[in-house]
Structure formats: C-alpha cells, structure tokens
Amino acid sequence: MSIVADSVRSLDAKVDLVSNVSLTVRDQEDDEQRDGDVSLGALSSSSPRAIELLRLVRTLSNVSTSGERLQSARLEWLLLESGLADRALHPYETALSAQTEDPYLSDAEKQFENDVEWLLLGKATVQTYGLLMQSFLDQIIPLSDDIWYWDDVLDSYSYSCLYTVQSTPLRMWAWTTDIYHESLSRFQRLGRRVSGQDPDRADEADEEESDAVPMGTPAAGHMHSNAHELVPQQQPTLSIQWRQFYSIVKESIAERSLTDLRRRVLSTVDVCRSEARSKRAHLRRLRSLTATGLGMLMAEGLNFRHPDSRLGWRGVLERSVSLMDMVLQSIMSCRDLGISAFEDKVFEMVEQDPELSVSEDELNSTEKTSLLARRLLRIIQESLPSHAEQMAEVATENGRPPRLVRYWLPAVTLLVSSSTILRILVNRRDDIVNWIQNLGVTVRDFWLNWVVEPTRKIINTIRHDSSSEIAIMSRDSLKADRDSLERMVVDFARDKPEMAVGASTITDSQVADIRSKVREGDVTPILRAYEKDLRKPFVGAVRGDLVRALLIQIQKTKVDLEVAISGIDALLKSQELVFGFVGLTPGILVSIGFFQYLKAMFGSRKGIRRGKESRRSVRVLRKIDRILSEAIPTQEKHLSYKDHGLLVCEVHVLRTLSHGALPADVEKEFVEDLGDLANLKSIQIQMRTLDRIRWAYAEWVAKAK
C-alpha cells in the first residue's frame, strides 16, 4: 500500500465513526419479527432508495478497506448511479420533485435516507481526496527529476555545451518558423495592395513596413525601394512573386538579426544557460505551489478531529470539498505569486464560497446533498483533468528535452556512418567469421579443460580411482632399487666377510642382520671397504674393491633420492582432493564472472536495480533531513504547508523504494514510522522519528550496495 491508500483508509474509517449509520441491511422478514422496535435495518429495507445507496456505500468502503486505487471513472459512475446529482435545484422544480416523493415514507425514514446520502458523499469525498493526493504526488516527483536535470546542466559548463548542441535544431526550427510566418504575412499584405483589395489600408501598411526597421539601416532602405519597384500595376508573374518573397525574407532576417542583439552580445552557451535557469525557476515555483496545495489538503482537508460545533462533520465535509476545488483552481493561476499569497488566496476563496452552508438547516436540506454531489462531479470531470493537462503542458514546456532532442546527435552520427560500418563489415566478413569461430572454440576448450576435466578428476579422487592418483614416480620403482641395493651389499658381504663381520666366514643370521640394516639405510660394510681402499686409491682401484664400493654407494644415493621423492609423492596423494579443487577454482571463478555479466546484461538486473534503489534511498533521507532542518516552524511548531507537502512526497518515494527490500515484519514497523514522520506533528518529534529510521533500518534502506 502507498501513503495515499493509508490516508484514504484512515479517513474512510473516521467517516464511518462520525456518521453513525449502520451498513448492515437486514432482511424485511427478520425486521418483522422484532416486537414494536423500528431498527435501522427496518428503515433501510422499507426504502428501496436507501438500500441502493447503502449498496454504493459498501462498494466505496470495500475499495477503501482493500487499499485499491479507485479510478476517477469508477468514482464518477458511482456518483451518477446514486442519482444525487440529477436533482434539480430550481425552487419550482424542487417543489415539483417534492410532490412526487413517496408519500408513505415517515419522517424518520426520510431522515435515515438523508443520513445515508451524506455517508455516501463522505466516502466519495474521501476517494476524491485520494485522487487529488495521488495526482499531486505524481506531478511533484517528475518535476523534481526535471529540476535535477537542469541543475546538472547549470552546474557543469560541459553539460551546458552539450545541451546547447542538443537544442540547436529546436532553436533553428523556431527561428526559421518565425522568419517564414513574418515573411508570409508581409507578402500577403503586399499582394493585397497590388491587387487593390485593401486600398484604404495601403498607406497604413506602407507606414507599418517603413516603421518596422529604422530608415538608416541598409535593410530598411532596401525594403523601401523594393516596396515601390516591385509593385506593378498588373498581376505579377511567378518569377516576380518569388523575387518579391525572397526580398521580404532577406528583410525579415535582417530585422530579426537587429532585434536579437542580446544573442549577439552573449554567447550561444550563455543564452542556453539563461533559458535553462528560467525553466528551472518555473519548475521550482510550480513544485512549491503543488507541494503547498498538497500540504493544505493534508492539514486542513477532512479534519474530523475538531469539527465545527455548529455544522458538525457535514460542515467539515462541505468545507473540504470547497478546499479541494479552490486548490485546483488556484495552483495554475497563482504561478506568478508567492507561497503566502497563494495560501491567502485559497483560504479567502474558501471563506467567500457562496455554496458553503451558513446554518444547520441549510446543511441538512435535500438540495445541499445534490449541490455537493454536483461539485464532486465537477472536480472529477473538469477541474482535475484540466489541472493535470495544464500541469503537463507547463512540465513539457519547461522540463527536460524529449529523447529525440537529447539523442539526435549520436543517432545522426550512427546514421551517417552506417554505410562505412556496413562496408567494413562486408570487407572483413571472413575475418569476423573466423573471430567468431575461434571465440567459440576457445570457450568450448576452456569449459572442457578447465571445468569439466578438473571436475571429473575430483570425482574420481573421491571414488578412489587408482588411475587418477597423483604420482611423481612409479609405484614399484623404489622397491626394485632397494632390493637391488640389498643384494649388492649382501653379495659384497659374502665375498668380503672380513670387511662385513671381521671373520673369514659369515653366517645366515649375520646376513639377515645385514639385510635389515640395509633396509634402514645402513651400508657399513661398503663404507669400511671404501675407506680402506681410499688410503691407496690407485692400488684399491686396480687390485681392491674401491670401484665396487663406489658403485654400490651410487646405488645407495639413488635409493635415498627415491625415498625422498616417495615422501613427497605420499604428501601429494594425501592432499590430492585439495589440489583438485585448486585446479578447478580458476575455471569456476571465470565461469561465474561470465555468467554474472550475462545476467547483468540480459537478465532482470535485479541486483543492480536494488543497489540503485538503496543509493536513492540515502538521497531521499538526506532530502527529508534537509526539509526538516531548513523548515521555518509555524506558531504551533509545525511545518508549513509547503514543507509538509514536500515531506509527504519524499516519504512516498522512500516507501515506494523500500517496498520488497525489507522483511515483512520489518516493513510493517517501517511503514508505521514513516506514517509518524509524514503526520503533521512538531518538528522535534519528526526529527527524532527520522533518526530512529536511520539507525533502525540502515541495514536494509540506507545501505548502498
């Protein structure tokens, strides 16, 4: 729901409270079972017109309760269906209609019917009030957007130059049109003088043309001479007429150049900035008046809290209708006045309204309901559409230029260069096709090699597929080299037992012990022989075991290296799943980024829109704070009508932006706080409410994403 729907629903409930009319129509059979008491249901059921009016009242109540926006055409139809506006107001016709009334209705039944009529008018007034509020809100927001546009143009000289270029065709068209119409008018006057159709005004026309331009200028002298040379006595030919028209056009251009001396003194950009400044001033004045009218309706319209003691709630209703009518009539007619003058004029027109009742008897008369119904219809049918049309005209005249004006330069550039672009595309067609094909192959290979294949390897790793295990060396390589080293050392020990065990023979237990030590990396027998032969390397190399010991140590070094590599291999195998995900991560990140880009380009742009709405919410909160900070309070410490109207407009925008961005339970509390902010209370209370909104809902509303 919007702020308008909430206001309409609240006022509709107040009308139900102050009217004291039951909307329940009981059946005639149920009423007959009552013992002697005449209830409201019996009264309504005995009057077909009252039943019909109550049906219309319930229709208006259902619309207000559901929060739907009642269209003006629907409200107009309901008022016409009630028949209140069809009653004649002439005394003779009123007396005639009184004679045709149902003579069987009692005074109580007639009074009940009149009460239902007032109830219907009250609900129709509330709906009309909602239409005016919505219309003012819909008008203020575009005006604010146009004012922002002119602020951007005036704040930057570059934007001013751009606006000058954009508006050049419009200025040229307006200048050409003025020259054409002025030249055509002069040519027609010249033709009438030549044909003798206007002999009495010939001298006067000559004087007008001679006074149009000072005689000292070349253009004036040229025009004066042509006015006598080009006026033959007979009907001129087509060529002569064309020369005459061409001469008149040249004179009109010369006159226009002398008249537009201001445009020669100032640069074109300065002239455009002056026009933008003037349009912005018109829009600001119109927005202020509209906001003031909205504030007056919010503060003074349908105020049932302190009704007039003489006329009651019906007087409040009648005065509210008059206020709505006068506000609509005065906004466009008071554009040149100030805010205070506009307020004084509206209240003065309401006080001098001849249709307002001065007594309770006049207010309770049958003619008063008809007059009020007619006035509501006049507001719906004439005043509101006329006001909207005038506002649209002023907004179009002073608002931002249309899209065609703003984008004609890139459109013309694209149109002019379209042939060149097409020729380039045709000449490089093969290259473009190859680029597209290569792009497709690259995307496919990237997807297969960096996404599909790593994913398959991860799945195989999870399933303990032996073919997918990471290995730096083969699984049987270390075992074979270790067994070979063991055999080499055992054979050396058997060949040289004195080096291995210090005896001439070696037992099987000693061989087993040597085998176990070799598995642990201990090759002491080889090192002993190596150390012995190393004392006499040449003799050991020829007659000893130096070469054999050296080769066995090389095998030992190879085994040690393979043991280290096998440790690294085991470490890799233990982290094989981690490496798989590391290999998959680049492909996944690139894919996610690409799909996010496509989603942003061709999708709903929900995230981007949500970020823009959040950033705009911050700006709206700033504007609300500025309105409350710079407002000059009234004697009651309240906002003025203008500031209140602007505040209601910004609250409406903030509520629209936050819809859907907050959880359901939080949004309910947020709407309640916005209602407190928009109500006409003291400025201090509204400032505290704004602070509460800032810290309580900053996570959803004021967080720029």
Image (tube, rainbow, N blue to C red):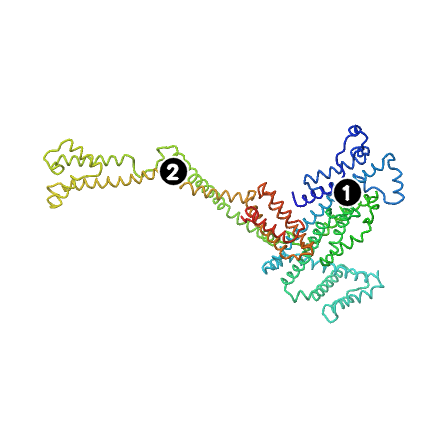
- In percent of width and height, residue 418 lies at 57, 50
In the rendered image of this protein, does residue 651 appear above or below residue 34? Answer: below
- Look at label 2 and name its amino acid: Leu
Discs 1/2, front: 1
- In percent of width and height, residue 542 lies at 11, 42
Mark 1 and 2 residues: CB-CB less than 8 Å, in contact? no
The part of the image, by quadrant, that contains residue 120 is top right
**Residue at image location 68% in from the left, 41% down from the top:** 67
Q: Quadrant of the N terminus?
A: top right
Q: What residue is pinned by disc 2?
A: 577
Which residue is the extreme one toward the bottom?
A: 216
The part of the image, by quadrant, that contains residue 20 is top right
Mark drawn on residue 121: 1
Disc with the residue nearer the chain's start (1 vs 2): 1
* Towards the viewer: 197 or 491: 491
- In percent of width and height, residue 494 lies at 14, 34
